[in-house]
Amino acid sequence: MVKLIILAIDSMLISNIVLMRFLGICPYIGVSKKQETAAGMGFAVIFVMVMATLISFFIQKGILDPLNLGYLQTIVFILVIAALVQMLEVTMKKIAPALFDALGIYLPLITTNCTILGVAILTIQKNFNLVEALVFSFSTGIGYLIAIYIFAGIRERLEWSDIPKPFQGAAIGIITAGLLSLAFFGFTGLVKL
Amino acid sequence: MNVLKKLFNGIWTSNPVLILLLGFCPTLAVSTTLKDAIGMGFSALFVLVGSNLVISALRKFTPQKMRIPIFIIVIATFVTIVDLLLYAYFFPLHKSLGVFIPLIVVNCIVFGRAEAFASKNSIIDSLWDGIGMGLGFTLTISVLASIREILGNGTLLGIELFGKSYSPVIVAILPPGAFMTLGLMLAGMNKININMEAKRKAREKAEKEKSKQLKASVANG
């Protein structure tokens, strides 16, 4: 149990997926102009990440490993994630229209979000069991939400500040992310995995 | 001439990282040492050229609605080839690139070129586009990695540059340093392009003025 809590804190804050592991930077920069959309994206990521990790976990352990097809991992996982996102979109529209209205527009963007594939592969590489995989994917998703929400808050303020012309747009965004990453560095040593 | 133009397009005019703002993840993550950066650059170059070639060759048989899954399979195939090749022949590099090799699949540069260029242009053009974009990516990541390795470690390609008295700026090889260095590179690129644009405009204006004067003198004369 303690191990699981440590794993959760580690993947949420210390090895934050965006600021420390550099995954999912494109949507991080792209969908962070407003706090509302950032939160929507964050929740969509959590949702898809947990689903994708679980399904790819079962595929790896149930199909690829017994048949010695480990080298097909990349192809199979990306196809599964692409199909999963499509399926989620359709089912959500039917079953939970309110949720679809909130997260729907972010779903297609998630296929190209490398956090999802990255976490699915990392789960296999780190040899997690099912419970650990669940905790890992969920808390990594929370970490993504925290990072993008704070970042969007800062960017909303940046809109009103006078930025030198060469720094406008992505440049100041990346530097801001750097400062945020420096802040997250403060969590290092909070717990030891 | 045309080929040079294409290469220049990939390396400078529409540099995939600094102008098109694609592929930040590997750029930031694998730029702690120049060696890793070059390895990553050439892996992506290989995948880009391969997927551009195949997608361009298949462009007449690809139904519009099915194109995205087809692109994904083609790209993932080349990524798997790179993954296995690196594992077999460059094991230390494979280990330090880690999860970022399979993640070339979702690298927006590769997908973006497939969608925006290879699916609409001839095989030869797509080949050069792939090479140009790949070189642009390799050069950008190499420059970033050189800056970070020199500042943060005092070495380049593992060779010590400043001797024992140099105290490294550790932050440069830590994650925050990656973001900040890339941010400054982006700003530098913008600055150069703004200056070039201003110069071009000034030149055009001068030329217009000249032709006006010429016309006036002709009319008067």
Image (cartoon, coloured by chain):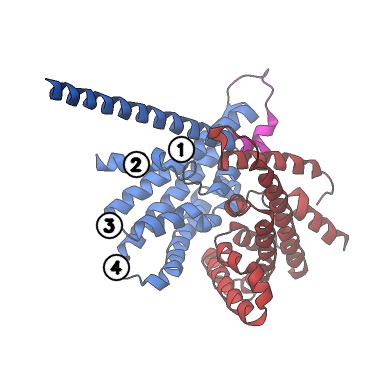
Measure how far apart labels 1 and 4 are at the Cα level: 33 Å
> Element at badge 3?
loop
Observer-nearest residue: B91 or B24?
A: B24
Give the x, y percent position of residue A102.
66, 68
Tell me how many marks there are: 4
Q: Residue at x 68, y 50 (%)?
A: A152
| Residue placed under numbered mark 4 in the picture | B60
In the visual, does B118 lie left or right of B167? Answer: left
On whether residue A120 falls in the magenta region, the answer is no
Residue B122, labelled with which disc? 3
Residue at horizontal 64 percent and vertical 67 percent from the top: A103
Q: Which mark is residue B7?
A: 2
Q: Is residue B102 above or below residue A175?
A: below
Identify whether A112 is placed above or below B20. below
Of pointers 1 and 4, the one earlier in the residue sequence: 4
Report the chain holding disc 2.
B
Chain letter for the part of the structure drawn in red: A
Q: Amino acid at mark 2?
A: Leu
How far across and how far down the image is residue B92, in percent? Answer: 57, 45
Q: Are marks 2 and 3 on the same chain?
A: yes
In front: B61, or A120?
B61
Q: Using a 10 Å C-alpha cutoff, classify the residue at mark 4 as few (fewer than 14 neighbours), some (14 to 19) or many (20 or more).
A: few
In space, the residues marked 1 and 2 are separated at their CA atoms by 12 Å
Co-location on one chain, circles 4 and 3: yes
Q: Are marks 2 and 3 in contact (CB under 8 Å)?
A: no
Query: In terms of sequence position, does the residue under pointer 1 or pointer 2 come before the other?
Result: 2
Q: Position of residue A130 (x, y in %)?
A: 74, 70
Identify the disc placed on residue B207.
none
